[in-house]
């Protein structure tokens, strides 16, 4: 199955049709999408662990209490032990950064964590554990089943909006009120 167009730097908004518990009421940023599949991170599922606690487990001392108290997020069910930092780019570079678009990147190397702990990291970031992944054609099939809405990414949704508001907030970018959608899929 060929992809119609790349959804890189798009937000996937789970519709009420989505019955997978890992994605119910989620907003996921697609970081990479091509003929081989897609990779993204969920941006509205806070964990009961802080950035400071995670960094302490990695023997990285946090110098800023403000950064240390920020919630870490569940990025998805794939590789839940792998950490990723979704961040604004342009300020500096780190070892393993995938450029999502001109203003946003995702980094998986330790150097960004050290910079964050010292207050020299990106001004806006999310620390996520795990990711979401789709094989070739899988995401396209889910879109045909009406499991997802898509819209261009918006940094206000990613970094500014409170986590509980992101699902409805992302849908509102499309002019959609999620409370009016039915869990039954329909096809024309």
Image (spheres, helix red, strand yellow):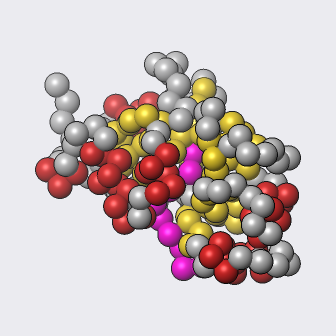
Question: Residue 145, how many percent across, how many down?
Answer: 32, 37
Who is closer to the viewer here, 116 or 98? 116
On screen, residue 56 above or below 164? below
On screen, residue 98 above or below 27? above
- Main SS type for the magenta part? strand
On screen, residue 167 above or below 73? above
- Reply yes or no: does residue 84 show up in magenta: no
Left or right? Give the position of 65 relative to 132.
Answer: right
Question: Residue 98, how many percent across, how many down?
Answer: 72, 39
Who is closer to the viewer here, 179 or 121? 121
- Count of marks overlaid on the render: 0
Quadrant of residue 119 within the rendered picture: bottom right
Q: Kindly tell me whether residue 172 is visible in this rendering.
A: yes
Left or right? Give the position of 7 relative to 162.
Answer: right
Where the C terminus falls, by quadrant? top left
- Magenta stretch, residue numbers: 40-49
Residue at (18% x, 36% y) in the render: 186
Residue at (56% x, 73% y) in the render: 71
Left or right? Give the position of 81 relative to 28.
Answer: right
Quadrant of residue 140 within the rendered picture: top left
Who is closer to the viewer here, 14 or 142? 14
Question: Residue 133, how many percent across, how many down?
Answer: 58, 45
- Reply yes or no: does residue 42 show up in magenta: yes
Residue at (47% x, 65% y) in the render: 45
Question: Residue 116, how many percent across, how many down?
Answer: 75, 64
Q: Kindly tell me whether residue 23 is visible in this rendering.
A: no
Quadrant of residue 176 within the rendered picture: top left
Residue at (43% x, 34% y) in the render: 152
């Amino acid at each position: 199955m060929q992809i119609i167009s790349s959804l890189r730097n798009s937000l996937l908004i789970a519709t009420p049709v989505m019955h997978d518990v890992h994605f119910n009421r989620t907003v996921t940023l697609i970081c990479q999408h091509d003929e081989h599949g897609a990779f993204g991170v969920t941006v509205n599922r806070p964990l009961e662990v802080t950035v400071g606690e995670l960094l302490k487990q990695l023997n990285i001392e946090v110098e800023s209490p403000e950064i240390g108290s920020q919630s870490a997020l569940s990025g998805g069910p794939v590789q839940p032990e792998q950490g990723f930092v979704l961040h604004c780019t342009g300020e500096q570079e780190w070892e393993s950064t995938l450029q999502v678009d001109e203003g946003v990147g995702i980094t998986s190397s330790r150097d960004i964590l050290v910079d964050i702990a010292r207050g020299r990291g990106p001004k806006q970031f999310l620390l996520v554990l795990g990711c979401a992944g789709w094989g070739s054609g899988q995401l396209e099939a889910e879109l045909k089943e009406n499991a997802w809405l898509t819209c261009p990414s918006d940094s206000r949704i990613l970094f500014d909006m409170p986590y509980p508001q992101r699902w409805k907030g992302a849908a509102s970018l499309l002019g959609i009120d999620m409370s009016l959608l039915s869990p039954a899929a329909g096809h024309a």
